[in-house]
Amino acid sequence: MSTAHRQGEPSWALRFISGKYQGGEFPLPANRDVVIGRSGDIDMVLIEDMVSRQHAKISVQGDEILVEDLGSTNGTFVNGEKVKRARLQEGDRVLVGTSIMKLVALESGPSAVPARAGRGDGDRATSRPAERPMSGELEAIPLPDLLQMLSSSRKTGTLTLTGDGGRGTLHFRNGKLAFVVLDGVDPSRPQKALFRLLAWTSGHFDLGPVTDPPEQPELTESTDALLLEGLHQLDDYRRIAPRLPATGAHLAVPTPLAGRLRDLSPEDLDLFQLVLDHGTLAIVLDGFAGTDLDAAKRLLTLIDSNLVVVA
């Protein structure tokens, strides 16, 4: 830390990065416990239905910071994992109710306790209703971490993402991801939409009430399985991305062809037809029935075989 703290002065704080208290900060006193819950006579009062009267406890003992669930109804989560007791490190995210708090180091003295995150001395949290019980920025909470939290805490609702890539909606039912819709992606291809959303590194998210599901088949895989496969595909796509043409580069079919079309698989023929009809990488990726990774691999094979050229 760049600035030394006086004996007993808080060195750490919980910063609210999502939920109705977003933007607030609660300094953690050195060498004592902080009880979090809905009761008015405890240290940190969070007034919301999903928080138990005495929900969790944060203990600061020297350099060690521990979080302990106090038998809450809805559980306490650290980085998406439900915990009974866990040691916290800087940057860890703690989910209590619909509030996500990030453990941060204080550089120069404690921040004032926000008016919306009350202490047990009567300075209670303001009980003003919020249209969206959970919201924030993907820069603070990456989408994979957010999906793990929603899955582990068995949330039900509609997660809306907005950013440069457009607008996406993810529908959860008791923590299971049921439907995914993204601008520019055929609604009948929810996995493709999800895998694209996992690549977003910026944007805003809101978790709101359940909305009418889209008219598409419901996802059958578990949220964990979808997340694992999506992150694997994202890593593979980023690995081959330097070999791909630019998004707006024009793709063309040479004349005469260097190979025989009858040697291509039906999927390769579909991709070839997309190149012939549309001719840019972005449109080809959008139009291909499979994932972006599958389309990219097949396109590179066609380019290597001189069946497709970059004009």
Image (spheres, helix red, strand yellow):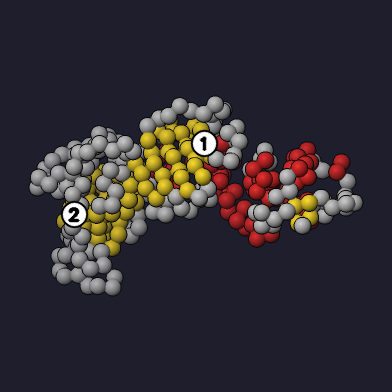
Q: Which residue is identified by label 1?
A: 180
Q: Residue 85 vs residue 311: left or right?
A: left
- Total number of numbered labels? 2
Residue located at (33% from left, 60% from top)? 90
Give the vertical position of 186 relative to 304 (above or below): above
Q: Are marks 2 and 1 in contact (CB under 8 Å)?
A: no
Q: Residue 290 location in percent, x, y?
A: 66, 40
Q: Please tell me which residue lies in front, 143 or 75.
A: 143
At numbered mark 1, what does the secondary structure look like: helix, strand or loop? strand
Position of the C terminus by quadrant = bottom right
The amino acid type, in three-letter code, at marker 2 is: Val
In the picture as drawn, the residue positioned furthest to the right comes out as 256
Q: Earlier in the sequence, mark 2 or mark 1?
A: 2
Q: Residue 216 vs residue 309: left or right?
A: left
Label 1 Cα neighbours within 10 Å, binned few <14 / some 14-19 / many ≥20? many
Q: Residue 209 location in percent, x, y?
A: 37, 32
- Whether residue 75 is visible to the viewer of this picture, yes or no, is no
Q: Cα distance, mark 2 to mark 1?
A: 38 Å
Position of the N terminus by quadrant = bottom left
Q: Please tell me which residue lies in front, 155 or 205.
A: 205
- Could you say which disc has been placed on residue 113 in the image? 2
Q: Which quadrant of the figure has residue 189?
A: top right
Q: Residue 285 vs residue 131: left or right?
A: right
Residue located at (45% from left, 50% from top)? 203
Q: Which quadrant of the figure has residue 77?
A: top left
Q: Residue 138 location in percent, x, y?
A: 42, 51
Residue located at (24% from left, 54% from top)? 25
Q: Residue 165 location in percent, x, y?
A: 53, 48
The amino acid type, in three-letter code, at marker 1 is: Val
